[in-house]
Image: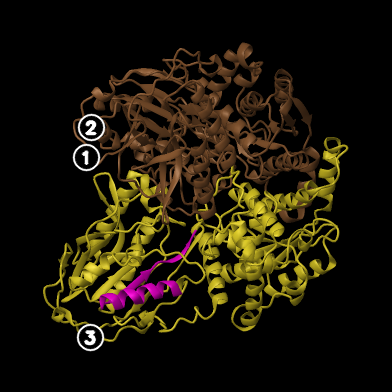
Chain colours: A brown, B yellow
Amino acid sequence: MAQMNPTVGAIEYNTKKIIRFAEKARVVKADLVVFPELAISGYPPEDLLLKQAFIDDNLRALKDIAKTIKETAAVIGCIDREGDTLYNAAAVIYRGRIRGVYRKMYLPNYGVFDEERYFCRGDKPMNIVVNGVKVGLGICEDIWYEDGPATDEAGAGAELLVNINASPYHLGKDLLREEILSKRAIDNNAAVAYVNMVGGQDELVFDGRSMIIGSEGERVVEARAFKEELIVTDLDFEGSSKPVKKNKGVEEVTLTAKKVSVDRSLPIPKALLASLSNKSSLADDPLREVFGALVLGTKDYARKNGFKHAVIALSGGIDSALVLAVAVKALGADKVTTVFMPSKYTTKASVRDARDIAENFGVELKEIPIDDIFGDYIKLLKPAFKGTARDVTEENLQARSRGNIIMALSNKFGWLVLTTGNKSEMSVGYATLYGDMAGGFAVIKDVPKVLVYDLSEYVNKRGGKELMPPIPESILTKAPSAELSSGQKDSDSLPPYDVLDAILKSYIEDDMSIKEIVKQGYAHRLVTKIVAMVDRSEYKRRQAPPGIKITSKAFGRDRRMPITNRYESK
Amino acid sequence: MAQMNPTVGAIEYNTKKIIRFAEKARVVKADLVVFPELAISGYPPEDLLLKQAFIDDNLRALKDIAKTIKETAAVIGCIDREGDTLYNAAAVIYRGRIRGVYRKMYLPNYGVFDEERYFCRGDKPMNIVVNGVKVGLGICEDIWYEDGPATDEAGAGAELLVNINASPYHLGKDLLREEILSKRAIDNNAAVAYVNMVGGQDELVFDGRSMIIGSEGERVVEARAFKEELIVTDLDFEGSSKPVKKNKGVEEVTLTAKKVSVDRSLPIPKALLASLSNKSSLADDPLREVFGALVLGTKDYARKNGFKHAVIALSGGIDSALVLAVAVKALGADKVTTVFMPSKYTTKASVRDARDIAENFGVELKEIPIDDIFGDYIKLLKPAFKGTARDVTEENLQARSRGNIIMALSNKFGWLVLTTGNKSEMSVGYATLYGDMAGGFAVIKDVPKVLVYDLSEYVNKRGGKELMPPIPESILTKAPSAELSSGQKDSDSLPPYDVLDAILKSYIEDDMSIKEIVKQGYAHRLVTKIVAMVDRSEYKRRQAPPGIKITSKAFGRDRRMPITNRYESK
């Protein structure tokens, strides 16, 4: 299983990577090497798929790859085209040629997925015969349905079901996957090899964790999360002795008529054997899991977009502290610059905390106070604002002065601005558009505030030894504040974050009505207020930078709400 | 035909509107009144459709509407639900009850459409019998396919094909529609009543122009574009004397067994008869058409989102001049404030032009020079920028100072900021994120620069009498410049706009490769440069405010490109 990290659109880069993985598989004498869904184009290629030349280039790359693959049979996720119709496909390659092409039968078109926009459905299950063992093919969504191709393929004698994926991460998804795969394995009395992509792509992180489930539903092996690797596993099969129950329309592609004798006495290079576990440590540790997703998402967004250095505005608060921890882990302390932009509303505690954390993490800290600039704006706007009272405008002006400064640093030095808003804030609009929302990548935009605290504690617990120095304790304990006016606290306008986050999850992730949320024990007035804040802030979110999907429903391509929307939930 | 303007989510508002239209239809003694697609929810409701309560509220509204409709038969676009499955449907209402529900059979899932995300396909054509005349039902996309329900319905005796729509505007679409409808009418020997929605919804404008095409393909009537109206038309049919060729699976709903005698001697109130044309004047005048779309899109975005007043940054250039013309037409001169924010790079000509146009259009003009603020930023950043040369950073700082000022006015007074960037600029990234891109609605973001000039000339030609005072001639003739540095001209970094726009259309709207564009007669180096600029600017566009779709492919929901994208077009 080649758990690889392609880059969307980088056909040549991905092709070379595939060839390298296939060569490693040859060296370890694998019978079969399997690559993720759309491995050549990367996933999701989105509207690149509407470009003829892009498809041409993909098909050409597949042919080039085929030529290089000799002894090992390979299954590679690719685009297939017939006339003007595109298919999400798996090409079967053996001895330098494409021997068959399986076409995905179930196309996801919900959540973050838009596959019906581009692809037509395939209608034919396919078994390939590899050294006498029948292997059924499937792509991602195909295995989530009981009536999917796996059933027909197993019925026609498949002992191994290969399922190739570009399955994006969200918290808890791994357990869900394993449950489905186990069920499918048991129901079909066949092993399942689940090969997932790894890597970050805009809002998505593919978490890898490719796995093999035995025919009794047991986990045989699971690859690491968030890492590229070749997983080499020996599996025993009955081969042709397995009886064929029925074969209704399953295409069969025989790669070798009989078992090729491979000299297994040759040693397999140690470096190629992955450090595999048969029990996921991540599933027991959701914080480590989420932190890993944030790190890979940030690292890949920077790398794949050509950024070598990031800049973060530190406020002395917990959100920017966590983003700093992620960035240092992802890019290294010498590739991160922090900026502290205090105003007269900044507390002494924040000054100290910002300096402490920058020192702890060993990153450069620039201090650029904004009082003068803010004062200049106020002076400049005085005639226009005559007769008006101070309100949120003045708060936004401070946030936007900071936004301008950090963007200027970004422009001057080519740094990626990592913004620090969390999901709770993004939900209720407790953020300034073009102010603290200004930047290239919103690392924790899908991390609710309560989880921000948990992750920060995780950083401090594991961090001392494994990862990095700690986030100052006072950052974890002080009351959250935007510090945009005197004595301001988040709690002035928001309920406690555990209450807020629970209401937000019900409304956003679970699409509950106000009535249903109130039934869970929250005050009607509070829920109505929160829901209205969420609805009203859609225009802000539409202009937010992308960030990493962590929950079952992230803002962005996952939750598509109209801005102009007069629906009043009741 | 009730060419109505619903608001997405405003179920109660839309319901009242439907009932009012139906009542008018009753007064004029219509046999049948037809409403657009998803008239109750508005279109597109997007992920509101994932909320159970939203569907419940829609179904309840449909029942409420049904109760109020007595003598007139009505066809109303609505959501239908069976178990957990949703359908895009047309309810047939007569004498207070829902008599039948047709379910859309062809679901668009390309361009701006995501219907497969929400709906399942219907599988049954339906004829209703209204006073002895068979009427076939269809929804939008259904009529674009030769094998669609219309063929079966006509085969089963339908003399009129009713097609209800939420068909978004783009330049030239009307002609395309009429061509298809004529073909469908002739092929099926049946008249076609095409009922379209009207109104703006985020990026989309529904242009109305509902029409009736006779069975020989001739246009009988076309409603006005961009206006809400009830179109009342008398059509003659053979009734039951038309032979039924075949009836394969067409459901038939009989509303009245025999012709009800309606007293047609009663006068129809004049006010209810629309001013209809049997020849579209718009199709002959694409500029009037585009201008109308911009005006309605802007008007509805403001109105439906509760904005009573807009603010525009005037630069003295043509883009902001055109946006001002649109805004004044949409909202009225007293509802538009302009801001002129000169710097030392602003030319005298721009100062004069900005003042002149504000005076011409009778709008308030605030002048807020930015040199001091800009100087303050430079001073503040001096230590951080030590040893660096002046570059685009300093230009962006000016644009962002302006962005902050206009957003402050917006925050303080609740004004909607209309941004002024055109499609050519948005394509190549010739705009400052959080600077001139800062705002709520990007009026001309899908209008290429050449079209900006044409529209401005249109405003001046027709404007003097019909619409508004002219845009100063010098704005139309001077060389375009961002005026962010000394003597800067757009032509320093971009080719002439007619060349740029042609290349952009080929790349963006037609998805051509570099090779194909070069074949059209452009230099390889130029095309490669432009394409790279387009690709590189995706991150900016992702954070742009919504604006009105004018071309066949707008940025936004229409063109979905990954930000992380290493594809190199050749």
Residues tagged 2 and 1 counted as in contact (Cβ below 8 A): yes
Is residue B25 found left or right of B468 in the rendered image? Answer: left
**Which chain does tag 3 point to?**
B
The residue tagged 1 is A248
The verdict on residue A48 being magenta is no
Asked whether B299 or B76 is in front, the reply is B76
Q: Subunit of mark 1?
A: A
Label 2 sits on residue:
A155
Question: The residue tagged with tag 3: helix, strand or loop?
Answer: loop
Towards the viewer: A527 or B136? B136
* Circle nearer the N terminus (2, 1): 2
Question: Which residue is the site of mark 3?
Answer: B264
Above/below status of A250 relative to A355: below
Q: CA distance from mark 2 to mark 1?
A: 8 Å
Would residue A477 be seen by someone viewing this image from the given angle? yes
Element carrying mark 2:
helix
Quarter where residue B278 is shown: bottom left
Mark 2 to mark 3 CA distance (whole Å): 69 Å
Give residue A229's position: percent from left, percent from top.
52, 24
Q: Are marks 2 and 3 on the same chain?
A: no
Judge if badges 3 and 1 mark residues of a common chain: no
Furthest residue in direction right, as rendered: B387
Dot 1 crowding, Cα within 10 Å, few <14, some 14–19, many 20+: few
Q: Secondary structure at mark 1?
A: loop
Residue B179 location, quadrant: bottom left
Q: Amino acid at mark 1?
A: Lys
